[in-house]
C-alpha cells in the first residue's frame, strides 16, 4: 500500500483479478497475503509478463513507485 500509495481495498481487488486469471498465486501468513507469479505458467507467458514488467520499469508513471520499492527492499522488505 505504501509503495503504490493506494488503499488496501484497491490493491486486493487487483490482485484478485490477477489470481482469478491464474497469473499469480497467493499464500496467507497470519493477517498478510503474499503474492508471486504462478510457477505453473507456461514459460512463454511468464517471459512475456517479465518483459512487460521490465518495459514498465522506466516508464514515467512508475518511476516513483519503483523508487519507493527500492527503499523498502533496502530495509529488508518485499
Image (cartoon, helix red, strand yellow):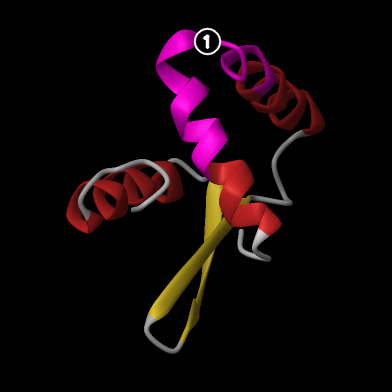
10 Å crowding of disc 1: few (<14), some (14-19), many (20+):
few
Quadrant of the rendered image containing residue 4:
top left
Left or right: 2, with 6 as reference point: right
Left or right: 52, with 34 as reference point: right
Q: Nearer the viewer, residue 55 or 72?
A: 72
- x and y percentages locating residue 18 in the rendered image: 42, 42
Q: Is residue 29 above or below residue 72?
A: below
Quadrant of the rendered image containing residue 42:
top right
What is the magenta range? 54-68
Q: Residue at x 24, y 57 (%)?
A: 8
Quarter of the picture containing the C terminus is bottom right
Whether the magenta-drawn stretch holds residue 72 is answered as: no
- x and y percentages locating residue 61 in the rendered image: 40, 15
User: In the displayed image of the protein, which residue is found farthest to the right?
Assistant: 43
Left or right: 44, with 60 as reference point: right
Q: Nearer the viewer, residue 8 or 48?
A: 8
Q: Main secondary structure of the magenta part?
A: helix
- x and y percentages locating residue 50 in the rendered image: 70, 27
Q: Residue at x 80, y 32 (%)?
A: 43
Q: Which residue is mark 1?
A: 59
Q: Residue at x 54, y 49 (%)?
A: 24
Q: Secondary structure at mark 1?
A: loop
Whether the magenta-drawn stretch holds residue 63 is answered as: yes
Q: Is residue 4 above or below residue 12?
A: above
Quadrant of the rendered image containing residue 75:
bottom right
Can residue 71 be seen at all in this image of the molecule?
yes
- x and y percentages locating residue 12 in the rendered image: 29, 55
How many marks on residues? Answer: 1
Can residue 23 be seen at all in this image of the molecule?
no
Amino acid at each position: 500500500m505504501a509503495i503504490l500509495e493506494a488503499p488496501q481495498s484497491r490493491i486486493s481487488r487487483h490482485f484478485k483479478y490477477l489470481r482469478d486469471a491464474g497469473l499469480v498465486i497467493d499464500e496467507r501468513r497470519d493477517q498478510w497475503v503474499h503474492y508471486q507469479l504462478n510457477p505453473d505458467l507456461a514459460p512463454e507467458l511468464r517471459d512475456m509478463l517479465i518483459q512487460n514488467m521490465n518495459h514498465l520499469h522506466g516508464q514515467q508513471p512508475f518511476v516513483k513507485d519503483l523508487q519507493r520499492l527500492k527503499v523498502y527492499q533496502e530495509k529488508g522488505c518485499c
